[in-house]
Image (cartoon, rainbow, N blue to C red):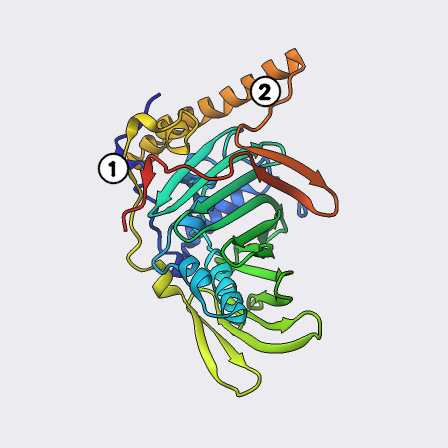
Amino acid sequence: MNLVPPAELFSHTCIDYADADYKAPNFVQRLFSLFRNVRPGSDLTNFQLPPQFNIPKSQLQFFGESAYLFGKDFLHQCNNAGSALERFISVVAWSISTTRAPAFGVAPYNPVLGETHHVSRGSLNVLLEQVSHHPPVSALHATDEKENIEFIWCQHPVPKFHGTRVEVEVLGKRQLKLLNHGETYMMKSPKLNVKFLPPRIDWIGDVNICCQETGLEAELCYVTSSLFGCRGLHSVKGKIYQSSSMKTLYEVEGHWNSTVKVKDINNGKETVIYDAKEVFSELKTPVVETLQRIWPTESAAVWSEVNSSILSKNWSKARDEKSSVEDNQRKLAKERNSKGETWVPKLFTVSYSKEDDWECSPIQERVPPAPIVVPI
């Protein structure tokens, strides 16, 4: 197993999520050149970017960062709030904190089948596996023994090209369990909207968050601007209500890249529940604590040579190394097909239905501490 030096494994982890738009007209022209032979409405799931358009990181790592890379610990707040309503509001804030956008014009690598990512932050242990390649599906399991919290996510991105933009529908179930309170919160993800003109990345669409045990529910709407306007850019609006009576308790309004407030319907009092600066300030780069414990399937190991080449801007070698990783995946798939074998995930059981889409269940009850840690 070859790894780049530990200090370089996560050199591009801490990007500025609060202001991730990258504006460069020449970059837009290069992007258009990539898509000139792609028809509007086409599924880009299998579309491969040249390494010049990649950041040295796998999409599996990027997905995992929304669980373990943060400045403010919303999970502690979710678990220790005094009432069910306060916990629900904290869960809404936590859900907003996971909607992060990459820099414009660049993207992580598409994970290979069986790729894993294992990171710890304090008592929070996070483990991911790429459970399907066609279509791409990532599973995430995280447990915090100190807080007695568990969350399980399943992510199936479906990117489609629409002429001047790419829209990524993010399918799959997400659940957060506050085990001390016997509460499970179900939620989904908004869509990622990448506009070429003007260059911009935003989240759009509706998100429902519900807790069956408390009967509380939230409806959030992520809104972007029109072609020439900017009023709705990065905005999120919605309400928190009691599902049995449909009575609205709080109105939600703000911007996911700055602040979000809730307004108490009874007294009109407004409270800031989310501040992006708190979440994304003073982010700590993960470090390798035990190199020998890193699995060969770890993202940093799978892509180590590609990462090293991109960091040194050796684009010819980066292209060759990336092709090598992808060719090896095709070779393994061909060998399985010739033997009539079906690949089975090692860490999750996976099910699919047209109504519920992908659902991933972890095999282990608890995630063990990882060899890669985020300093606190």
Pick the quarter of the image with the N terminus: top left
Q: Is residue 359 visible?
A: yes
Q: Helix or strand or loop: what does disc 1 sit on?
A: helix
Position of residue 217 measured from the top left corner of the image (x, y, whole percent): 62, 66
- Image coordinates for residue 349, horizontal then vertical, percent: 61, 33
Crowd tier of the residue under label 2, counting other residues whose Cα lies within 10 Å: few below 14, some 14–19, many 20 or above: some
Question: x, y percentage for residue 172?
Answer: 62, 47
Q: Amino acid at mark 2?
A: Ala
Residue drawn where x is 37% and y is 33% of the image: 300
Q: Earlier in the sequence, mark 1 or mark 2?
A: 1
Residue 220 horizontal side relative to residue 56, left or right:
right
Compared to 47, does 247 lie above or below?
below
Residue situated in front as seen by the camera: 232 or 141 = 141
The alpha-carbon separation of the residues under discs 1 and 2 comes to 33 Å
Mark 1 — residue?
Answer: 7
Marks 1 and 2 in Cβ contact (< 8 Å): no
Callout 1 amino acid: Ala
Q: How many marks?
A: 2
Occupied quadrant, residue 205: bottom right
At x 53%, y 66%, the residue is 88
Q: Which residue is mark 2?
A: 333
Q: Residue at x 45, y 51 (%)?
A: 148
Looking at this view, is 29 or 366 the one in front? 366
Q: Which mark is residue 266?
A: none
Compared across the picture, whether 364 is left or right of 55 comes to right
Q: Residue furthest right?
A: 354
The outermost residue toward the top is: 339
Q: How far from the left and from the top, in percent, is residue 367? A: 45, 39
